[in-house]
Image (spheres, rainbow, N blue to C red):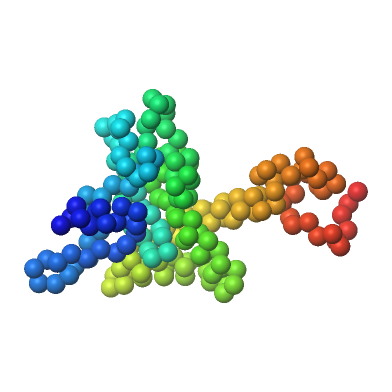
């Protein structure tokens, strides 16, 4: 039954689902079965939901594109910061204001590895995700190449800021380095000053 499938995929919403139609197994999605990905409250619905609580989104994961309904948390009668909730749950929104496309951290990391080691282009990577989503008609899958590239650049920059220590104000503790430098310190390289 649909509810059993939803319950079984509560913590793994990016599996490809097939259902028996009486003659053969056909592709379906958790969204079509009524699944809603709830942010906050350990994956369960927020008690303070609003009438427009569900938002359809496109998610890019390592096994392709997915369409799911998201429900944000509206606790404490505060205006929710949707991007912050998405970041907290491992999603990287394409935009900070009213996001409609999100990327999993796994797909951004995988693209970065493919791009750096095999010099795979972003266009090829997105085409492979389209192929995994619908191998029979990949052209029917929405193309998120530009959005993926923007998110990838921002994600890579944030990783560099974090790895350099600038996210934790390392300049306060190591004064002999240039301020706000995100390059990895090389003790043998000459530095000005």
When the figure is inspected, residue 54 is found, relative to residue 25, above or below; the finding is above
Instruction: Identify the image quadrant of residue 14.
Output: bottom left
Residue 191 in the image, given as x and y percentages of width and height = 87, 54
Q: Residue at x 41, y 70 (%)?
A: 128
Q: Quadrant of residue 115?
A: bottom right
Q: Is residue 8 visible?
A: yes
The answer to whether 112 is drawn above or below residue 31 in the figure is below
- Nearest the camera: 20 or 44? 44
State which quarter of the image contains the N terminus: bottom left
Could you tell me residue 135's position as x and y percent?
31, 72
Q: Residue at x 32, y 30 (%)?
A: 48
Q: Is residue 56 left or right of residue 157?
A: left
Q: Measured along the vertical axis of the image, is residue 106 above or below residue 92?
A: below
Which residue appears at 40% of the width and 26% of the height? Answer: 76
Residue 156 place in picture, x, y as percent: 59, 56
Residue appearing at x 59%, y 72% in the figure: 117
* Residue 154 located left or right of residue 13: right
């Amino acid at each position: 039954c649909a509810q059993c499938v939803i319950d079984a995929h509560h913590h793994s919403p990016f599996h490809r689902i097939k259902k028996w139609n009486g003659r053969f197994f056909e592709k379906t999605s958790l969204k079509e079965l009524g699944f809603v990905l709830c942010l906050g409250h350990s994956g369960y619905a927020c008690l303070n939901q609003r009438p427009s609580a569900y938002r359809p989104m496109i998610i890019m994961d390592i096994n392709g594109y997915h369409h799911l309904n998201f429900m944000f948390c509206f606790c404490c009668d505060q205006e929710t910061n949707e991007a912050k909730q998405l970041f907290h749950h491992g999603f990287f929104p394409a935009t900070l204001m009213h996001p409609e496309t999100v990327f999993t951290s796994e797909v951004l990391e995988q693209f970065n590895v493919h791009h750096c080691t095999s010099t795979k282009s972003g266009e090829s990577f997105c085409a492979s995700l389209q192929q995994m989503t619908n191998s029979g008609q990949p052209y029917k899958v929405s193309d998120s190449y530009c959005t993926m590239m923007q998110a990838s650049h921002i994600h890579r920059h944030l990783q560099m800021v974090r790895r350099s220590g600038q996210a934790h104000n390392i300049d306060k503790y190591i004064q002999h380095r240039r301020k706000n430098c995100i390059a990895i310190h090389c003790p043998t390289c000459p530095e000005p000053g």
